[in-house]
Structures are given as structure tokens and as C-alpha cells.
Image (cartoon, helix red, strand yellow):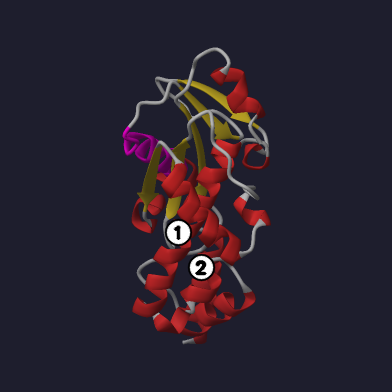
Amino acid sequence: MREFEEKYWKHNIYFIAGIDEVGRGPLAGPVVAAAVIFSDDINIKDINDSKKLSPDMREDLYSEILSKALAVGIGIVDNSVIDKINILQSTYTAMLRALGKLEIMPEVVLTDGYPIPNLPLKQEGIIKGDSKSISIAAASIIAKVYRDRIMEFYGMEYPDYDFSSNKGYATKEHIKIVTRIGTCEIHRKTFSPIKELLSRFIKKR
């Protein structure tokens, strides 16, 4: 998990930010990106792509990453902006916001997949980077836990939608709820599944 970072560390390039996002696919809620910079002596056991970890493991690693990282930045773009500029541009915006929140200016940015357009920093895109780079894996964990917590708060604000369980994703229960009672303020109205579900809801009335 340190191979890509080591490549830069051995050339005295130390401030390497791994970045990743969570929340591109849900029907509701924000997209969240995180950026993480570690020192070259970092050692965190069991770190991996957040999707491969249990919720308890993610919570434990979240705290450990925050305590051991040189810098952590989090960027959030809510559903209203997603509806205005689309999810891809919102993802890039969240990533840029996360990088802007870092207390250390990175020398290199490692991204999960493709580089960020128009970023004025050296960057390297790594396919499946969240399972190959310790920095990107850490960013995926921070983003996932942070977004899940946001959705749990929304679960209290909009109890009818069970956001604390579905986190805004298109689960069968979530789809049934939207078909039955319509959308709420945090749903992404421009997403095709939401348009279809709203159409079903309107027809039922």
C-alpha cells in the first residue's frame, strides 16, 4: 500500500496527498471528498479501500488516520449544486475543496482513477488506487465515514426516508419510500432514477 508514495519519498518529495470521493451514486445527499497527507514513516494496520472494510473497522481507522496524518482535508458538495452542475463536476469540485482544506500544500496528488482537470499541481491517477495506495485508501475511509455521519443526521431530520440505513443509495426500501411519499429536500432531482420515481409518485396521486 506504500508503493506509489515510496516512489516520491525516495526522491525527497514528502507532501503527497491521496484523494478520493464517496457519494457519486446515491439518489440523495452530498458527494464528499477527502485528501490525506502522511509522513514517510506511516504505518497503519489493515488500511484498505473503504468498501472492503466493515463499518466498525472504518470508524476505528478514521480515528487513527486523523491522529497520524500530517494533514486531512474534506470537501462537500450538496445535492442542490449537484443538480446544477452535474455529479461529475460536483465530484471534481469536492476534490478541489478537500485539497484547499489541507494545512500543507501537497507537492503531488494521487487520485483514484483519472487526474483532476485543471489542477495546478503534479498529479498521478491510479486505477483502483484506493486498494493500492495508503494515502488514497485513507482518503476513501475519511470520506466514507464523514458522509455516512452526514446521512445519519439527515436520517433524524427526515425520519420517513431511513437515510441512517440506506445513506441515500437506491436500496429497494428507499425506492419504495420515494414511490410512496415522493422526494425530500436532499434528493437529487436531476438523477434519472429520481425522475422516474417522481413520475410513479405523481401518477399514484
Q: Which residue is labeled 1 in the image?
A: 147
| 46 sits left or right of 62 in the view | right
Disc 2 residue type (three-letter): Lys
Residue 5 vs 177, above or below: the answer is above
Nearer the observer, disc 1 or disc 2? 1
Q: Which residues are magenta?
A: 90-103
SS of the residue under disc 1:
helix
Name the spot of residue 30 as percent of width and height, x first: 42, 57
Whole-angstrom CA distance, mark 1 to mark 2, is 8 Å
Which residue corresponds to mark 2?
167
Residue at x-position 56% and y-position 58% = 58
Q: Which residue reaches farthest bottom?
A: 205
Examine the image and state in which quarter residue 115 appears: top right
The answer to whether marks 1 and 2 mark residues whose Cβ atoms lie closer than 8 Å is yes
Residue at 58% x, 81% y is 176
Count of marks, rendered view: 2
Badge 1, how many Cα within 10 Å: few under 14, some, many 20+? many
Note whether residue 33 is visible: no
Residue 166 percent location from the top left of the image: 55, 72
At horizontal 49% and vertical 42% (from top left) the residue drawn is 88
